[in-house]
Image (tube, rainbow, N blue to C red):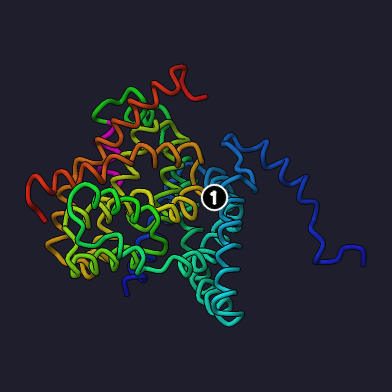
Amino acid sequence: MSELPTKDPAPDADDAAESEARPRPIRKPISWSMIVIAVLVAVSAALVYRRDGADGVWEILKHDLGLFGGILPRVLAGCLLGAFITEILPHEKVSRSLGPKSGLKGLLIGTAFGAILPGGPFTAYPVASALLTVGADFGATIAMVVSWTLIGYGRAIAWELPIMGTDFTLWRIVISLPLPILAGALGRFVYVRMYPKGAP
Amino acid sequence: MNALIIDIILWGSVAALGFMAWQRGRAVLVSSAREGTMDFINIVPRIALGVIGSGYIAAIIPQQVITGWLGPDSGWSGVLAAVIAGATTPGGPVVGFSIGAVALKSGGGSPQVLAYVIAWALFAFQRLLLWEIPFMPARFVWFRAAVSIPFPFLAAAIAMAIGKP
């Protein structure tokens, strides 16, 4: 009876083996951003409790737990996409076409890629992270993320068109068209001046 | 219905890329699937905190306050207020667009509403914390957000120049 199921089977040993096998940067489980969010959430929950009592806190918790359950499988899909992309994309090719020396073409490819990428944040961010891992630079990745947010069709069709109307949405997208390229270019411009010797 | 289409596209892409990995050998597929799953396990607590916590953050920042910032105040001070409002708007896609729509109907200038929607899309703090930080290197996230700051203003300037939308 020494092996109770509640006992964690030596997580440290597993983690160590895992980190040796992986070339990617290991994400620390507790980071400053997480602490900031946790504090923000705790303060907000306390304010809700003071305003609406325990019922108010419970209502929000129930709603958000449902949301969380719905999102989880998609997050898994996004993580798998990111991992497969890291494995499949040839690194030299990516750093040639999306790397620091890829020029305007790299920014255009990033923009096009962001615009056609399907899914929501659960795909865009793991994929962007995978691109960074396989050799894309900050500039091209910024172009991709900004393009996904501003000219990606997913959110525009699902939410913006019905709520904001066709006229506003179309003009908003037209005006946004140059922004991913400009953001990527600005990102590169700042990056080489902040880190003249490459990544810190 | 919409969600179903998203799921089909999403898992279809996973299957297609998984197949491509498999073509390079079973070991490649297994190791990358394992890595993706490990990423998932690492990310779940962060997503849990963000998603479960964001309801509370949204509950204490009432939408009326943000709509007030987007009032019919024209000109560049209105644009600046709109950008700050966009950055602080919590909640999912419905919230930002709904506030924008209310502002348009209640007489907000369209360059200001445009700046609001674009600022919210680019660097709403809650999305940075909830979605971007868990998935991407924090250094990249802050860098990207900082670099994005001029663009809502640029979009407003373009809108004022061409008189649309």
Q: Is residue B59 above or below residue A36?
A: below
Q: Is residue A145 left or right of residue B135?
A: left
Q: Quadrant of residue A53?
A: bottom right
Name the residue at 34% across, 56% down. B85
Of the pair A98 and B141, the residue shown nearer to us: B141
Q: Residue furthest bottom?
A: A55
Task: Give how far across and how far down residue B109 sits, in percent.
Answer: 16, 58
Q: Position of residue A138 (x, y in %)?
A: 39, 33
Question: Which corner quadrant of the image does residue A166 belong to?
Answer: bottom left
Q: Residue at 19% of width from left, 61% of height from top? A: B72
Which residue is situated farthest in the right direction here? A1
Q: Residue at image x 43%, y 18%?
A: A196
Disc 1 chain ID: B
Tell me, yes or no, whether the highlighted magenta stretch contains residue A79.
Answer: no
Magenta span contains residue A112: yes
In the displayed structure image, the side of residue A69 where residue A93 appears, left or right: left
Q: What range of the chain is rendered magenta? A: A106-114
Q: Label 1 sits on what residue type?
A: Gly
Q: Quadrant of residue B112?
A: bottom left
Residue bearing mark 1: B36
| One can see residue B35 in this view | yes
Provide residue B117's location: percent of width, then percent of height: 27, 56
Chief secondary structure of the magenta portion: helix
Pick whichever, A137 or B93, lies toward us.
Answer: B93
Circle 1 SS class: helix
Residue at the far left: name it.
Answer: B162
User: Going by the image, does B97 lie left or right of A141?
Assistant: left
**Where's the C terminus of chain B, which quadrant?**
bottom left
The local crowd at label 1, few if under 14, some if 14 to 19, many if 20 or more residues have their Cα within 10 Å, is many
